[in-house]
Amino acid sequence: MEKTPEAASDSESSVYSDLEEEEDANTSDDASSSNEQESADSNNDKDSENENLKDHHEDQRNGEYFLKKNSEEKKVEQVEEYAVDSSDEEDLRNTVGNIPLRWYDEYPHIGYDLEGKKILKPMNSDELDQFLKKMDDPNYWRTVRDNTTGQDVILTDNDLELIQQIQKGRYPDSSYDPYEVREVIYNFATEQEEKWRSKEPEERKTNFIPQKFSCLRMVPMYADLIKERFERCLDLYLCPRERKMRVKINPEELIPKLPKPKDLQPFPTVESIVYLGHTDIVRSITVEPVGQFLASGGDDMTVKFWEVLTGRCMKTIHFNGKVKNVAWCPNTSVCLIAVAVEEKVYIINPGLGDKLVISNTDSLLQTPLEDVGAQKQQIISWSTADNEQWTQGIRCTVVHPRDVHQITWHSKGDYFATVMMEAGNQSVIIHQLSKRHSQLPFQRLKGNVQKVLFHPLRPYFFVATQQYVRVYNLLKQEISKKLLTNCKWVSSLAIHPKGDNIIIGSYDKRLSWFDLDLSTKPYKTMRHHKKALRQVAFHRRYPLFASASDDGTVIVSHGMVYNDLLQNPLIVPVKILRGHKVTQDLGVFDCCFHPYQPWIFSSGADATVRLFT
């Protein structure tokens, strides 16, 4: 039997204390005795000290002495581990856990009980005690030693039966019959079957409906056998190895919450006036900056001027070719309109409106200036109109090397740009009316130019090719941005009056909204038309924009741009305007808004111009 470290330390301290007392007693006796007996007393002291150390070593070898002394001082009671029977395997009396028990070989205890008290090791018996116990104890054959507590445990009859079953290779529970037929499957009632069919396959507890048959040969083949095997092969082939949960979404929740069209009024809804007079396709229309007159040009080689409110044709000018484009000068101090007929651009004073403005316009154009740019480049030539042209209203002519397809004015009305799609690097030319000067802004152009546009507030110039829109800084003479349209062929271009947003129409039935401060990619793309888009336009005052298409419709949308940069534009289609007839697969060619009223004009292949209010 070995002692604990605590008991050993207590016993050793007691022994050494006794030795110290004896040494103190000896030293006191030595001090009182005479000097002659010092040698004899010292010899006696050494003999007594050696005897005490021998006694100490004998007591240290005998662990029973220290164990009895320690148990008497601390009064540690020995705990019977199986005083309370517990069938739970984890509810052990020894709470040291799953650790090697050899760690307690040098201690008198083997662990701790549930209350934290030490579990002392039992007395070790020799072979003679084991033989006597075997002869006297009738339960010796069923007694085993619990290594965790050191106690002897008597096995019950159930424990013996379980051990015998395991030794024979059988089920531990002798009452269990694996071949017993148990009735656990029951047939569904009518309500249960309907409830089972109404659930989704993922929500069903079983993937089959229980059925009962009279015999085994009446059981048919599983109906979903091939399907389940095929799905299993797909699972193994694709190896997703995860369960995909089906998300239930209400289709109404996917529709964005947009304001009602009634709350976004005013916008054009009704066809009010049809302007009749053209005999062929009307390709282009433009409105006077004041909004009193309207000009239209088409393939019948005429330009007609209309009074907006009455629909009366005020004037007609005939040309020798098809009119491709008309554009009214935005400067209200002059009355001018530019007309593109084949390779020529005519500057016309229609003579409508205020007489003072008309006279000021003629006085401005009657003093021709020397065209220095044309002399240098020998590409563009300016010429003054003859008497016959002057009577019709033509004041000057700008001759280009190729056919002109578009004319666009700067917001101040002095500069205008023309586009020749087939001229290569000379496709874009900027003209100055006051100096009769023309210039090529680009030496090299990538792609075929389709449309150009001036920024309404800043010195920026937009050039649209088939798939890209490049923004150039005219002051720095460098490219500022390159917009990715994500379409195959750009057909039209329009810019918001504030200049931070543009819309682009394409022949592949798309309308793209760009936020120039946000990204170079479309902020929103709409596909409401069934055919190619011919023209897009913004309103100058109202939050409206429109798109004209070959499907014969004009779609008016609400486009609110907020001053708060953190708030996205509100884009809501509000009205589809119908009225034009599709002729030879061609519909509406051009559309433009009234400068002050929420009205829109449209022209189409049916040789009509229509006003929607």
Image (tube, grey):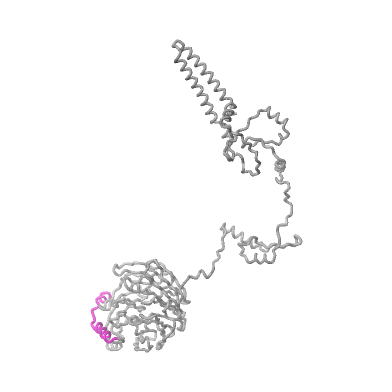
Query: What secondary structure characterizes most of the magenta part?
Result: helix
Q: Residue furthest right?
A: 214
Which of 243/187 is in front?
Answer: 187
Residue range corresponding to the magenta coloring: 354-377
Residue 298 coordinates in the image, percent (x, y): 39, 84
Residue 508 visible in the current orientation: no
Residue in the picture at 30% in, 75% down? 430
Residue in the picture at 56% in, 30% down? 73
Which of 455/347 is in front?
Answer: 455
Q: Is residue 286 left or right of residue 84?
A: left
Residue 436 position by quadrant: bottom left
From the viewer's perspective, is residue 244 above or below residue 124?
Answer: below
197 magenta-colored: no
From the viewer's perspective, is residue 466 above or below residue 128?
Answer: below
Q: Residue furthest front?
A: 32
Q: Residue furthest top?
A: 36
Q: Quadrant of the N terminus?
A: top right
Q: Is residue 100 left or right of residue 528?
A: right
Q: Is residue 235 left or right of residue 357?
A: right
Residue 203 visible in the current orientation: yes
Q: Is residue 604 left or right of residue 336?
A: right
Q: Quadrant of the C terminus?
A: bottom left
373 magenta-colored: yes
